[in-house]
Image: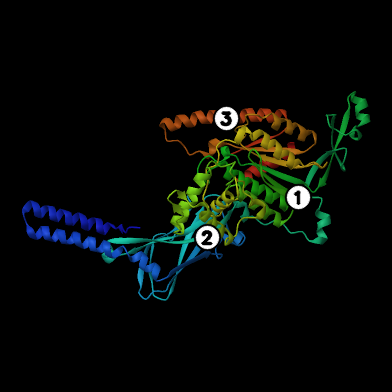
């Protein structure tokens, strides 16, 4: 890259041009020669600065960095991970093998758009020959997901600091940013002696015809077992009545998370999906702490990931992995870029990041591109194998899409579910969450219910699960709370129209779910997660 002129160079050049122009006007040869000499000096400084970058590379300047584990953030997370919206620190080490000292300026890590540098950017350091110099950068991730630091960009000043040669050190560093619920106390690890006593859990579960405590006597409903009929009460009222009993059981709870395109509108950190991930992680932590079994399903037209229900601290880690995987989808049927766009994206990244150019006269050498990406993947630790599968047209495109995910290259997500299948996908996910057993489960669906063009299968599934006594609750993130305040004009008018449409959809969804006996909770970006949990607990007692 060409050297970058500094403010000194701009001021000097402007002064030289002005002096030369003034000399021409005043017919002063001395002024013209002085101005020309300064311009020639600037050109000489440019020529001397241009090869600095190549010379430093020849002197083997090495970069390594790592995540610091001596700060408050990493104290709450597992090794190699941090917590969203909480500052963390990375350390960079530069080892200089050359024989001459030199300065580095404008040090800045290459980050994704949702990660900002809060400390250490723009520092100037002096590298001594044969020594190692350490840098520290403070970073913050706006949302849960993968944080990829691609490398370190610096500039090296030339003579008189008129130009600075840009230099880039490619060194990818991948960090997991866990949901904010990770800072809470981990689920208690039950000892073998207490396991049998605590297997009953802490949640009362209503079961028709089974249990120890009588909850109520009500009218017979379709699906009620024959043995639950209360014959004496039926004789008194003249209607068939059933006994509703409840008992303390270890509950199997499932979280069904809608990750479709309508949940991804807006900047990272201010999306409905980010809010839903935080809520799902917090609910899972709460349930696991109570000794329950918790599972997770992410869905968009099809089931994207399914974490089977289990208990314990290890299960929370598996759920976190699936939630983070929902933020970095690269499957062909869920993202917009086609194969040609993927090839161009990876080729451009490798050319800029690693200096590998696979361009040919007829396009890109696909085999060489795939080979380099496969070698990079083999040297890196990919996500959990349960969520590492990628849907693509063939093996080569699968490798390139996996490379995009590993290096944090975000692919545009489809704004609409393919073939308007959102309703069918939600229905399929709810049936998987209910399972095939006879024991009722607790199911929490988090969705904006936007794009349910053909909701018949979804409504039918809700009715079926209610007759099977599954505890269903729904949370709808209010899109109006995630949009920044409009500053007037056309934007304010559009926000008003959009807000009216959102209000109508919330009202219609609430009425429809109420008819099916399913409570709906509308959550806002301004509501703390604990407030939403309290509202869910109240909805549970009413259900």
Structural crowding at the residue carrying mark 1, measured as other residues with C-alpha within 10 Å and reported as few (<14), some (14–19) or many (≥20): many
Identity of the residue drawn at 57% across and 41% down: 272
Q: Quadrant of the C terminus?
A: top right
Label 3 and label 2: CA atoms lie apart by 43 Å
Q: Quadrant of the N terminus?
A: bottom left
The image shows residue 471, relative to residue 64, as above or below, that is above
Question: In this figure, what is the number of numbered marks?
Answer: 3
The x, y position of residue 426, in whole percent, is 67, 37
- Which residue position holds label 3? 503
Between circles 2 and 1, the one closer to the viewer is 2
Sequence-earlier tag: 2 or 1: 2
Between 312 and 373, the one lying in front of the other is: 373
Structural crowding at the residue carrying mark 3, measured as other residues with C-alpha within 10 Å and reported as few (<14), some (14–19) or many (≥20): some
Label 2 and label 1: CA atoms lie apart by 36 Å
Identity of the residue drawn at 15% across and 59% down: 36
The x, y position of residue 476, in whole percent, is 62, 37
- Which residue position holds label 1? 292
Q: Give the image quarter of residue 222.
A: top right
The x, y position of residue 337, in whole percent, is 52, 43
- Which residue position holds label 2? 173
The x, y position of residue 210, in whole percent, is 87, 40
Tag 1 near tag 3, CB within 8 Å: no
Identity of the residue drawn at 69% across and 28% down: 456
Q: Residue furthest front?
A: 361
Tag 3 near tag 2, CB within 8 Å: no
The image shows residue 253, relative to residue 403, as above or below, that is above
């Amino acid at each position: 890259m060409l050297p970058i002129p500094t403010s000194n160079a701009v001021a000097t050049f402007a002064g030289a041009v002005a002096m030369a122009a003034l000399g021409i006007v005043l017919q002063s040869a001395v002024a013209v020669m002085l101005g020309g000499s300064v311009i020639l000096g600037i050109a000489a400084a440019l020529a001397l600065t241009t090869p600095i970058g190549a010379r430093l590379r020849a002197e083997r300047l090495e970069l390594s960095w790592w995540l610091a584990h001596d700060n408050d953030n990493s104290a709450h997370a597992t090794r190699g991970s941090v917590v969203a919206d909480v500052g963390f620190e990375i350390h960079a080490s530069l080892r200089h093998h050359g024989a001459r000292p030199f300065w580095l300026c404008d040090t800045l890590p290459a980050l994704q758009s949702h990660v900002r540098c809060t400390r250490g950017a723009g520092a100037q350091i002096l590298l001594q020959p044969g020594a190692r110099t350490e840098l520290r950068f403070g970073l913050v991730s706006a949302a849960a997901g993968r944080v990829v630091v691609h490398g370190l960009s610096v500039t090296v000043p030339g003579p008189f600091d008129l130009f600075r040669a840009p230099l880039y050190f490619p060194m990818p560093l991948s960090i997991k940013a866990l949901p904010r619920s990770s800072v809470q106390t981990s689920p208690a690890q039950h000892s073998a002696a207490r396991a049998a006593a605590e297997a009953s859990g802490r949640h009362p579960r209503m079961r028709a015809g089974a249990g120890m405590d009588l909850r109520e006597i009500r009218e017979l409903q379709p699906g009620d077992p024959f043995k639950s009929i209360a014959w004496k009460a039926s004789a008194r009222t003249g209607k068939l009545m059933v006994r509703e009993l409840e008992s303390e059981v270890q509950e199997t709870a499932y979280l069904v998370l809608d990750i479709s395109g309508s949940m991804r509108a807006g900047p990272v950190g201010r999306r409905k999906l980010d809010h839903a991930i935080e809520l799902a992680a917090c609910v899972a932590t709460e349930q696991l702490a109570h000794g329950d079994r918790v599972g997770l399903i992410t869905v968009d037209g099809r089931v994207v990931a399914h974490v089977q229900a289990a208990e314990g601290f290890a299960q929370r880690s598996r759920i976190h992995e699936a939630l983070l995987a929902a933020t970095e989808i690269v499957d062909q049927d869920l993202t917009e870029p086609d194969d040609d766009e993927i090839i161009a994206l990876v080729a451009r990244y490798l050319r800029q990041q690693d200096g590998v150019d696979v361009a040919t006269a007829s396009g890109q050498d696909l085999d060489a591109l795939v080979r380099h990406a496969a070698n990079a993947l083999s040297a890196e630790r990919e996500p959990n194998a349960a969520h590492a599968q990628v849907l693509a047209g063939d093996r080569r495109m699968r490798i390139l899409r996996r490379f995009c995910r590993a290096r944090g290259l975000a692919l545009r997500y489809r704004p609409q579910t393919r073939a308007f299948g959102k309703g069918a996908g939600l229905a399929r996910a709810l049936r998987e969450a209910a399972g095939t057993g006879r024991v009722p489960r607790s199911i929490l669906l988090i969705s904006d219910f936007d794009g349910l063009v053909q909701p018949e299968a979804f409504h039918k599934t809700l009715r079926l699960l209610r007759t099977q006594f599954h505890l269903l609750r729904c949370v709808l993130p209010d899109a109006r709370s995630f949009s920044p305040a409009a500053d007037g004009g056309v934007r304010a008018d559009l926000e008003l129209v959009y807000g009216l449409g959102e209000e109508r959809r919330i009202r219609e969804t609430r009425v429809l779910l109420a008819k099916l006996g399913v409570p709906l909770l509308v959550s806002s970006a301004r509501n703390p997660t604990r407030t939403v949990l309290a509202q869910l607990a109240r909805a549970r007692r009413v259900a």
